Image (cartoon, helix red, strand yellow):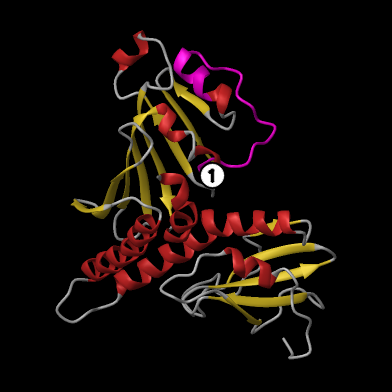
Amino acid sequence: MTASAPQATAAAPLAALLPTRQGKPWTVGPAPYGIRNNAATSRITDGRRALIVVEDAGRVELFADRPDRPDRPDRFPVTPDAVVDSTDPVSVAALAARALRWILPRLDADAAQDMARKAVPNEQPWQWVMRHKGAALTEVGFALVQHGTHPVARERLGGPGLTWTADSGAECEWGVWAYGAAGNFHLTYDGPVSGLYGALPVLLPPLDERVCTKARSAFAQYLTDRFPQLHPANDGEVEFGGRQDLSGWVALPSRTELRGPVHDGTPVCAQVGSVGVDFLLAIAPHLI
């Protein structure tokens, strides 16, 4: 696009809503190419990832700006990764949430796969990827410390992780775990169901018309009454998720729990994935 092309007005407020990584905030600049004729277009980047913001008649489209590689057919974006119908603050915030929930994690997963294909002297590619995942978890750990908790570094077969206990008056243990060399991270929880009440509003997708009315157990009914985005998977488990958004589940640790009454202290376990580091940094205050 030419230097005289208009800039997207939503670009700067969108960039301000994305977390700073490794001391590098998101900045706004001209897009290197046009996507829609005569549409205001900007590129926002943190130096490692980039997004193209296109505005046309109040509609805002967001595209992942992937590396220009001849072996990648989607190197020039055609279909937007997220769309909103206004440039107002609420719509821009919704666009930022979609970037955090699935666009940036997808870019990070692509980068991890690229990294895994490269030859590294004296190191297996997957070891290099895991080292970078460990560095990303360090960012999450510092964010949690800033909010008053004390995460502990862990290791398991799938890769590095962090665990911490929430300061909620009950034993609520959270964890973030690398999910293989090509994936992102999984968020886990063990503790009373009430320990999820502060996190589920930011983990679940926005409420839509698909409200669950078929809960067949007291446990499923207890959670779907509070969070209609949840859907029963079976008597002891509820789930959520879409094709590209975050997905997850909340479950009783054993079927013996089905015999007892359900209350805020009922023990549960939960998992959400695939989660990106940017999203974890944004929701850190809700995980303590």
Q: Residue 86: x, y in percent?
A: 79, 58
Q: Which residues are magenta?
A: 202-223
Could you tell whether 240 is left or right of 261 in the image? right
| Residue occupied by mark 1 | 202
Quadrant of the image containing the N terminus = bottom right
Rendered image quadrant of residue 225: top right
Could you tell whether 83 is left or right of 188 in the image? right
Tell me the kind of residue under disc 1. Answer: Val
- Is 41 in the magenta? no
Query: Dot 1 surroundings within 10 Å: few (below 14), some, or many (20 or more)?
Result: some
Residue 250 vs residue 191, the one in the foreground:
191
Q: Residue at x 29, y 13 (%)?
A: 256
- Is 219 in the magenta? yes
Q: Residue at x 34, y 57 (%)?
A: 145
Residue 25 vs residue 182, the one in the foreground:
25
Could you tell whether 120 is left or right of 50 in the image? left
Q: Residue 111: x, y in percent?
A: 40, 70
Q: Residue 79: x, y in percent?
A: 66, 63
Q: How many marks?
A: 1
Quadrant of the image containing the C terminus = top left
